[in-house]
Amino acid sequence: MKKSFKITAQDKDTSARTGIIKTTHGDIRTPAFAPVASQGAVKALPHNLVKDLGADLILVNAYHLYLRPGLETISEMGGIHSFISWDKPILSDSGGFQIYSLASLVKVKRSGVQFASHLDGTKIFLTPEDVVDIQYYLGTDIMMALDYFLPYPSSKEDMRNAVELTSHWAERSKKHFLTRESSQLLWGITQGSIDWELRKKSTEELMAIDFDGYALGGLGIGEPKSQFMEIVEKSDALLPKEKPRYLMGIGYIKDILEAVDRGVDLFDCVLPTRNARNGTIFTSQGKIVIKNKKYETDERPLDGNCSCYTCTHFSRAYLRHLYERSEITSAILNTIHNLHFYLDIFAKIRQAIQKKMYKNLKKKLIDINTEDDSE
């Protein structure tokens, strides 16, 4: 596979590292956070603001874009970068999460997956090869192999079957990917929930196939946090150091910090953007629920330590007013702040690792109480 990842600094006390993932559309500085843009847009923000906030990449969803607007439309428009006018790297999810989240509309077979479209019920059958082709025609920089995971908890036998099927699909995905002349990167996704025997098996089988990067999937869905982190730590010891690691769908800052400590390079999550639209704001002093009446005449910014547009221009009182009136501007301003908060933390993480001070930063950030409504 292509050599697309370079480690630039390694923390002295942990497995945390900084690096560069090279893609056709630019470099991704790691550890990195990918704002979720499932339909080709980060909800509530135009792309120029997403860039200005410091995002090196965004994540789109291959399954949803395949349904609407469809590959023909996107191909005619010159691919996903041209279609959405985003000239930086894009990572596409394969649809494995939709197998999980739309389980009642899905039939999983060894040959592939049959979806009943959540839009109109149309039957759609996708093989692992089809999923590679969808991402190939989208033209994303990093594509993911189709994977299969189950709810937590599930029986050992069912999980074993899911791991076996994920490896089978991964092998087919890689074989088909090699028939395409492409500068895109193909990453595999390990499964096995918190069962180390199965996770180890999955990881070793995917390493034998040899991907450009490796993701840890099927975590953060209700399993005990200590066991979740144990899987991340053991995976760090097993995965090749020269390849990037991606912890899928994990967005709580404490979890991110612990995972970076254990060698993870890439994250994505809807948490900052979805919470922003719901009026939940993350700050350096903790969490704010902006609808609370105590903010009705609060002249302070959301976060006195924040330099984002929202915090340098507007009071909590005004932001509460916008939220209470269901103004579109509420979602925009809240999202600007929450994404700035996340992407700024990632910039601080990279800086701390480079200065061999990650342990200190991690303690400082974890000490922030993110559960209580800030006063």
Image (spheres, helix red, strand yellow):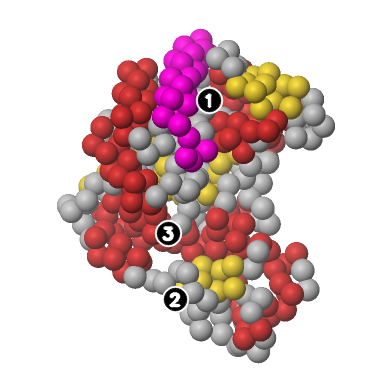
- Looking at the image, which residue is at 77% across and 69% down? 326
**Relative to 342, 324 lies left or right:** right
**Relative to 137, 16 lies left or right:** left
Q: Residue furthest right?
A: 120
Residue on which disc 1 sits: 146
Three-letter code, disc 2: Gln
Percent position (x, y) of residue 285?
A: 44, 76
> If you read the primary sequence from the N terminus, does the residue marked by circle 1 or circle 2 appear first?
1
Q: Which quadrant is home to the N terminus?
A: top left
> If you read the primary sequence from the N terminus, does the residue marked by circle 2 or circle 3 appear first?
3
What secondary structure do most residues of the magenta stretch adopt?
Answer: helix
Percent position (x, y) of residue 38?
A: 63, 42
Percent position (x, y) of residue 274?
A: 62, 57
Residue on which disc 2 sits: 285
Residue on which disc 3 sits: 253
Secondary structure state at the residue bearing disc 1: loop
Percent position (x, y) of residue 304?
A: 48, 80
Dividing the picture into quadrants, the one containing residue 292 is bottom right
Q: Between marks 1 and 2, how big is the CA–CA gap?
A: 40 Å
Is residue 174 one of those drawn in magenta?
A: yes
Three-letter code, disc 3: Ile
Query: From where the camera sits, is residue 28 visible?
Result: no
- Looking at the image, which residue is at 37% across and 25% down? 202
**Relative to 298, 144 lies left or right:** left
Tag of residue 293: none
| Residue nearest the viewer, comparing 240 with 225 | 225
